[in-house]
Image (cartoon, rainbow, N blue to C red):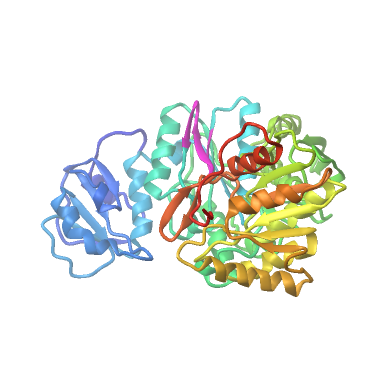
Amino acid sequence: MTGFLPKTLKMLVEDLPIHYSVGDQLSHIKVTGVVYNHRELQPGNIFVAVKGQKVDGHDFIPQAVERGAVAVVGVSDDVNLPVPYIKVGDSREALAHLSALFRGSPGQQMTVIGVTGTDGKTTTSNLLYQILLTANLRAGVISTVNAVLGDEVIDTGFHVTTPEAPEVQRYLARMHSAGLTHVVLESTSHGLEQHRVTGCDFDIAVVTNVTHEHLDFHGIYEGYLRAKGKLFEMLADTPLKSCGNPRLGVLNRDDQSYAYLSSITRTRQVSYGMSAEADIRAVDLHYGPDTSRFTVVGPGFTQPVETSLVGPYNVSNCLAAFSAAVIGLDLSPEVVASGIRALNGVPGRMERINMGQPFMAIVDFAHTPNALKQVLLTAKQMTSGRVIAVFGSAGLRDREKRRLMAETSADLADISILTAEDPRTESLEGILGEMAGGAVSHGAEIGRTCYLIPDRGDALRTAVGMAKPEDLVIACGKGHEQSMCFGEQEYAWDDRTAMRAALADLLGVEGPGMPYLPTRKG
């Protein structure tokens, strides 16, 4: 099924590649959309009842029918409705496939590259996107920062993970309609576990790393790893495409995820890394405060690479993108190196903020123990002075991270300032107390090398106020994000704006005002 042509209920349901049962005869009534939120339902839509963490979509089936749903999909038994009820084993999986079918299965018309991992997904996705543009390919990207559909850039929202399946398929359909041939799709563990990217027909799967994160959702590391692995398992299910079928798994030979992901990948695979066992590896590494230079060695080629992305972890991200492009897409190493060089930076990733201050100020998205470790190691290489780190740990998320991140900063930063990062409905004081315990256990001294400052604006002002020439201040955890959550309310917040505000106050120069948070005193 190609192109966005009118779809009937009978056509869509009978094309579902999963088991289903339906008590009523399916009609040829035209379907106008596929939704999971009853409040967004329009007449002619199929309503898919999804069980969420707080609400169950099955409870809203009567409202959906009243609003004009032509059919309902769910997992419950014995549902008596005036419209067809399609029972499935997993309504999220059905939502993904129906969304793809309704849009004409756009993933089947393009080369789709999926990028997953704990850290580095957005950077690697942007590297691949830039490589594709450099190779004169018509490409788009869907990341947790935004969706780039040709000339159009769409903000994908607050605190984003992978968009829900209907949004993903809508983006893919718009890309295909715009004549794009390649798309890079950042795929989070939540997105994979909840079938948000099911039906995307991936051709290449890339992993950056799989470290400690999201255990509040996945329970244990193995569950988290299995969720990531779904991307690689899906490669074997991708149908034949007229544009070709690379079918390649790109694995990190240096990461603990390698053995498992290699064992479940039923297609071609290639490994990258620093170790001699990697198929594609980096040698002759040179790290500077503004650039990284290295040589990529692979089967039949040796290619020098230079990038404005700093730190060893970004060399790994470059290798991941390099492997996908050269081995998966058969692009020349020279073109790929040019694409890597052309990427000047990624919003909120080691982004420098300069208001004329005599020290470096950086904003980064690092919000996991491993990411914080890597950016702090890189920060130490970038300055001869002290590293002052400002960060928090989110509420209603993996609690063990709080201790681990504080321990990491106590080990690597000269000064740690612990502050708010989306406390949500948890006690911010309690979160900071847990973090302080971790910092102290690794030798930090409260009031000398570690400070607890609940208001993030005050924390940034304190950090830049104590910075001396040649020091480096780095704010971690928010990066590109545009809000912070207290209770159940989002407050407009951008770490980059806040850093500029703190620097402007320090220097007495014109700059933005400090964004408001409810922790502000006075």
Residue 241 visible at all: yes
Nearer to us in this view, 306 or 77: 306
| Residue 308 percent across, percent down from the top left | 75, 36
| Residue 435 percent across, percent down from the top left | 64, 68
| Residue 496 percent across, percent down from the top left | 61, 41
Residue at 63% across, 65% down: 212
Location of residue 418 (image quadrant): bottom right
Nearer to us in this view, 297 or 187: 187
| Residue 386 percent across, percent down from the top left | 82, 52
> Relative to residue 222, is residue 312 drawn left or right?
right
Residue 1 part of the magenta-drawn span: no
Residue at 72% across, 47% down: 464
Residue at 35% across, 33% down: 3
Residue 18 visible at all: no
Q: Main secondary structure of the magenta part?
A: strand
Give the total number of marks visible in the rendering.
Answer: 0
Which segment is the magenta one? 140-154
Residue 150 part of the magenta-drawn span: yes
Q: Residue furthest front?
A: 522
Residue at 72% across, 29% down: 335
